[in-house]
Image (spheres, helix red, strand yellow):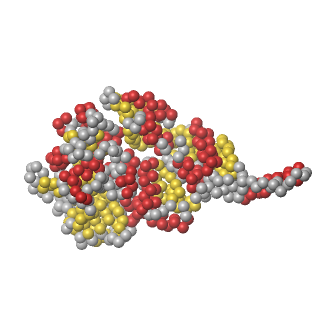
Amino acid sequence: MSETENIRNFCIIAHIDHGKSTLADRILEFTGTVPKRELREQTLDSMDLERERGITIKSKAVKIAYHAQDGREYSLNLIDTPGHVDFSYEVSRSLAACEGAVLVVDAVQGVEAQTLANAYLAVDHGLDIVVVINKIDLPNARIDEVQRQVREIVGLKDEEILIASAKEGTGTQDILEAVVRDIRPPSGDPDAPLRALSFDSTFSTYRGVVVYVRVCDGSMKAGDRVRLMAKGQTHEVEEVGVFGPKAGLVERLQPGDVGYVMANIKKLSDVRIGDTITSTDNAATEPLPGYEEVLPVVFCGMYPAAAQEYEAMRNAMERLALNDSSFTYEPEVSAALGFGFRLGFLGLLHMEIVQERLEREYDLSIVTTAPSVRYKARTKSGDTIYVDNPSKMPPTSEIESIAEPFISADMIVPAEYVGNILELCERRRGIHEKIEYIDKNKVLVIYKLPLAEVVMDFYDKLKSATRGYGSFDYRFIGYTEGDLVRVDMLLNGEPVDALSTIVHRTKAERTGREFATKLRTIIPRQLFEVVIQAVIGSRIIVRESVKPLRKNVTAKCYGGDITRKRKLLKKQKEGKKRMKRVGRVDVPQEAFMAVLRTD
């Protein structure tokens, strides 16, 4: 029997809130990996943000010893994955490190949008799938109905679909038995040249970069010299280990093992997620396939509230990018906000999480501009340019056409709310594709939608329109030309680049009005009038103003000639005009945050 015969690498995948982390807790408890006194809810969710929000943000790996009913001792490498659509890149990286997946489906909610997406992703990766219907302890569980939904999607027989209650621990042993029985052991040659896939990494102040790997061929131990194939640097391995709930040292990592490597890697830029690690003495000729490069869909500017924090923010970005390679960043300068960065994310929740991690883990105070998507503009000279910052869009007179990114959105909703969803999608310039009944109560609605109409608050509106029962998943499908314009906000004739936005012409005036009204209520009154204008090119579409603070200059005039009062008021008016020419408008951070909260 080969050394890998008793190893099983699998991850838990599901729609958000279907019970992945709770099932992971029960597996840890059942196998005795974590003592009962140390067990807590969401044991593998170590980040404060994860525990507060009750969601998984980062995939977590853990090594489990399991004594099966066939009498053999198995080594299980479990990876708990996120469920939210914004973290689907984390899921795809986890799948690449596994041979199997446990697909969890809620017995009440049934098949949801991310259930479909994750099932197809697992099939694309060639994984063995174990399906579990969870939450059977709930009084309104619909086991037979959900079994039928799963049967039609995954193509399994009823007897192959397991039922469980992760909360009560029912069915945990059946799931573990199915994992060792139905998921194949890893393949790999221990005598071949070393090939290990890096699927994540973190930074330790004292030890440098810690690389998380899945060994596919060969083996690795402390003292070996290894090479990172993408960058070509060589390093000496200082320590190798595996993941319990806490990391543990081992003598060597062999084919099928999921663990970590410390090799005195000091530069953050030396490590790339998806890179292949090989030995310098007996090097592999071909790297492992790695991962598709992630494509950000939402962009925003982030600036330090205090200019002197710029370097600290740059260092924080470098470290965070090592742990979360799915966001991108590059330096940029704003006339309104100074030096900062332009960041790209996989969605609005992803953006929110990154901002919160920067503020909490690195003690930064950050100003964030309104989110936007990446547009494709064709100039009259024939050049094609991609614009992820609205203020960098060329003037209207130079543009031949603008194309915006479109997505294909899969929405699974109760049948009685289909009308609400169709109305919502039509309002967001959606193009109807298909309506398909999953069963008599659940409907799959597919629409093509402009990404810009989705990133702000589409998910919230979908949840409201379906009383919380709707689910949503999307994928990018390409660019489509549209009648798009750039709306700029001017304060006393000066453009505020951080508040520029690109919208469809039919929504330009409404957007300008919303921005101007919010700015009027938020910008504090100055000693001079502040004129707020929304413009398209040189055409003003909206005008508001913040009245100046006024001193009562006529208070000292008791009766007497009216011309004396008029003279004093005229003098005051001239002074206000002069101040307006030279005065600088103070724009508080709330003004930029208000744009984020546009209804």
Residue 17 visible? yes
Q: Residue furthest right?
A: 561
Quarter-wise, where is residue 143 in the image? top left
Q: In the orientation shown, which residue stands out farthest toward the top? A: 440
Quarter of the figure that contains the N terminus: bottom left
x, y percent for residue 263: 30, 69
**Horizontal placement of 418 versus 33: left or right?**
right
Which residue ends up furthest to the front in the rendered image?
A: 558
Q: Position of residue 57 (x, y in %)?
A: 36, 52
The residue under the point 54% across, 44% down is 598
Q: Nearer the viewer, residue 396 or 362?
A: 362
Image label count: 0
Determine whether 262 is above or below 540 in the image: below
Between 442 and 239, the one lying in front of the other is 442
Work out whether 473 lies above or below 201: above
Q: Residue at x 45, y 65 (%)?
A: 315
Q: Residue at 27% of width from left, 38% of height from top?
A: 138
- Give residue 63's position: percent from left, percent from top: 22, 58
Residue 146 sits in quarter:
top left
Please report the residue visible at 23 percent of the width from the left and 67 percent of the height from the top.
249
